[in-house]
Amino acid sequence: MNARILPHVTGPLGGLFTAPGDKSISHRVVLLALLADGPCRATGWLDCADTQSSLAAARALGATTAQDGDVVAITPPAALPSGPLLIDCGNSGTTARLLMGVLAGLLPAGGAVVTLTGDESLRRRPMARVVDPLRRMGADLRYAVQDGRLPVVVRGAALRGVDHELAVASAQVASALLLAGLGAEGRTLVRGAAGARDHTERLLRDLGVPVGRDPIGSSVDGPCRLPAFSLAVPGDPSSAAFFQVAAALVPGSRVLSRGQSLNPTRVGALRVLERAGALVVGEPAGKAVTDAGGEPRGDVEVRAGCLRPFMVDGAEMPSLVDEIPVLAVLATQCPGRSVISGAAELRVKESDRLALLARNLKRLGAAVEERSDGLVIDGPCSLRGGATGTPLVFETAGDHRIAMAMAVATLCTNGETALDDEACVGVSFPGFFNVLDRLLAGGDPARP
């Protein structure tokens, strides 16, 4: 473990920052390149532990990759390996789940046998939600050790398009099925993903694939090969949210996020910040830039305002599920009762995020009730850490979003606090603490 003493706040946050490239899109750039007919390139690509898992998987399958900072190039394999392969997806659920769909449609019958595994945390996460519908398409996927969990063994098989109804509105599951559908005969229709991230559909549509997306669901017709592509990845709104919530918490704060994604399926946290009393100013309607890949991006300014309690329910959850940890921190400082519900999915993330949030916030003195699908928080709470030299140490369970949320909680905490593991933030945001320090200094973290 790599412990870190968290900073004390002496004044407001100020300045501008550029959020790292969107993690969801960065994964998809790599995995879609495996299905392309020529070299692919992306700028603004997120270089973190999770996305490196996808890049390593592409190399294991025979792709050639090159990286220079936030620029990545991937040339798809001329031929897939013929022998058995073991691909370690690390801590990345996106890599594992989307790769199942890619491999199901890409591997030829009688070709390589690929086993997907991951770290201890990922091997505890549910995989049946992807495996079961892929099997309905004819995919040959088998559990190597425990039903419903990695490792999963994938063999090539003939796929057919199927009409799917999702049990969980998951962009990962929907994307896996659509990517498998590119290698299947006939139409693959995915229902029940309303409100979930639509990055895969936007990317495919921008590449000329006729993707249907309507109230019924999203669909692709296969088999279909993708053209080579070049695109820019917008800033990740889930990463930007930590500093935007921090600005809402600390009086007098004002921060500007440059070039972040304004995809309608990703701006739920900004809507909650507005309801909670923060002042949020985004790009005017029609002024956002739409990048190659079909993704809108623009600048967003957040200023501290007069806080008030808020509610988040299941209908909003797909648009802000990764931001719930830091929004729970925000709720501790809102006068009145804030309720987060419909968030049972957080119990099967990198950690049981609801349980960890409740434990950490209660130790600070927050009034938190943990429910099966959410949290009830009564504020404002006077948060207290430990004495100098004996900090209150937050439990992260190696979960990057818990670690970053607790770092934000420290901004409104008296006393000394620390993280039991600071290195875990590298899963999604390696430069998080540098940006936080510069905003606390009122500087410009977008500059070298």
Image (spheres, grey):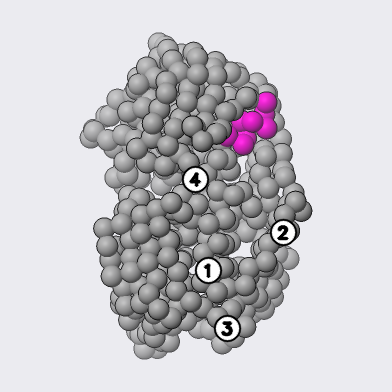
The local secondary structure at tag 1 comes to helix
Q: Are marks 2 and 3 in contact (CB under 8 Å)?
A: no
Work out whether 75 lies above or below 391: above
The local secondary structure at tag 3 comes to loop
The answer, for residue 288, to whether it is visible in the render is: yes
Residue at x 54% of width, y 24% of height = 220
Identify the disc placed on residue 275: 1
Residue position marked by numbered label 3 in the rendering: 251
Q: Position of residue 68 (x, y in %)?
A: 68, 45
Closest to the observer: 144 or 313? 313
Q: Are marks 2 and 4 in contact (CB under 8 Å)?
A: no
- 147 with respect to 330 (left or right): left
Q: Residue furthest front?
A: 215
Residue position marked by numbered label 4 in the rendering: 195
Measure the alpha-carbon separation of dots 4 and 3: 33 Å
Measure the alpha-carbon separation of dots 2 and 4: 21 Å
Q: Please name the amino acid that badge 2 sits on.
A: Glu
Q: Are marks 4 and 3 in contact (CB under 8 Å)?
A: no
Q: Which numbered mark, 2 or 3, is in the foreground of this view?
A: 2
Q: Where does the N terminus fall, quadrant-wise?
A: bottom left
Q: Please name the amino acid that badge 3 sits on.
A: Pro
Q: Please name the amino acid that badge 1 sits on.
A: Arg
Residue position marked by numbered label 2 in the rendering: 283
Identify the disc placed on residue 431: none
Residue at x 43% of width, y 44% of height = 92
Q: Residues within 10 Å of mark 3 (few under 14, many from 20)?
A: some
Measure the alpha-carbon separation of dots 2 and 3: 24 Å
Work out whether 347 lies above or below 388: above
Q: Residues within 10 Å of mark 1 (few under 14, many from 20)?
A: some
